[in-house]
Image (spheres, rainbow, N blue to C red):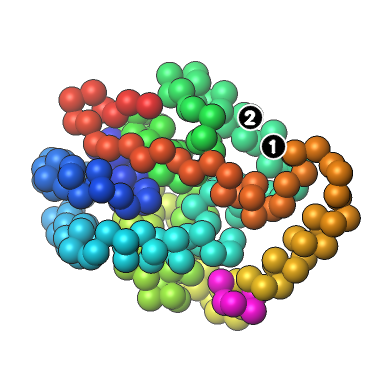
Amino acid sequence: MIELQILSRLLEYPDAELVQHQQEMFDALSEAQAFEKSVAHALGVFMRDMLAQDLLDAQASYGELFDRGRATSLLLFEHVHGESRDRGQAMVDLMAQYERAGLMLDSRELPDHLPLYLEYLAQLPEQEARGGLQDIAPILALLAARLKQRESRYALLFDVLLGLADTAVDPQKVRDQIASEARDDTPQALDAVWEEEQVKFFADAGCADSDITAHQRRFAGAVTPQYLNITNGGQH
C-alpha cells in the first residue's frame, strides 16, 4: 500500500533528503487511492507546512516530540513491554517476521520503530496490511490522543492510520484514559528519570555492555531514513 509508505516517510526523522524528494512525495500522495480527498488534502498541507520550516527547527521539534520521555515514543514495544525481558523476545520474533517477508535490517535499525513497521506492512497484500494496523490500533489511538493533547500536527498521521485500519478502538475512551496522565517530557519528569537511571548505573557498575541505561537502549539505533520508491515499493 503506497499510503503506508507515505505515512512511514512522514513519521521518519526529517532530513535534507526528505526535502530533496518532496516532489516524489507529493506525486505519490496524488496516486494514493485509499485516501479520501479530504485526507489527501490534509496530508498535503501537513507536508507543505513541515517542508516550509527551517530543517533544523523541524528536526528539533521532532526530537522534542518523539525522543523525550516514553509517552509518545515511536518504538511500539515501549508501549507494550516497557523495559521487561519480554521485549527482547518480541524484537526477535518481529525480526523473523520481517525476514520472512524479505525485509532485511541493518544493525542500526530497531524492528519495533513505527516507520519501519509501516514500511513492512506496505509490502504485504492490502488485507494483511490492514490486519497489521489493527494489531497495533490501541497503540496508534494512544499516541493520537497524546499528540492531540500536546497540540501536535503529527496527530493527523495517527488518525489517518486508524482510518486505514478500520478499527473498533474508541478514540473517546482513549482520550478519557489519558486525561489525568502526568506528562513525562517536562524538565522535572526527565530529571527524575535521569536520577533513577544514574542510580541503576552505579548499582550495576562493572556489568557488561548490555546493561546500558534504559534511555540508551531506547535510542541506541535510529532508523536509517527510507524514501519513497514508487517503481519497486521501497528497498531496505
Q: Find disc 2 in the rendering and name its residue.
A: 92
Q: Give the amino acid type for the residue marked by disc 2 in the picture.
A: Val
Magenta segment: does it hold 188?
yes
Q: Is residue 137 left or right of residue 78?
A: left
Spatial CA distance of label 2 from label 1 is: 6 Å
Say few, some or many: other residues with alpha carbon within 10 Å of mark 1 (under 14 / 14 to 19 / 20 or more).
Answer: few
* Residues in magenta, as a range: 185-189
Q: Find disc 1 in the rendering and name its residue.
A: 88
Is disc 2 in contact with disc 1, using a CB cutoff of under 8 Å? Answer: yes
Where does the image place residue 86, in percent across and percent down from the top left? Answer: 73, 41
Q: Is residue 10 left or right of residue 149?
A: left
Q: Quadrant of residue 187?
A: bottom right
Q: Is residue 1 left or right of residue 134?
A: left
- Assign the C terminus to one quadrant of the image: top left
Res. 141 in view: no
Residue at 19% x, 31% y: name it: 230
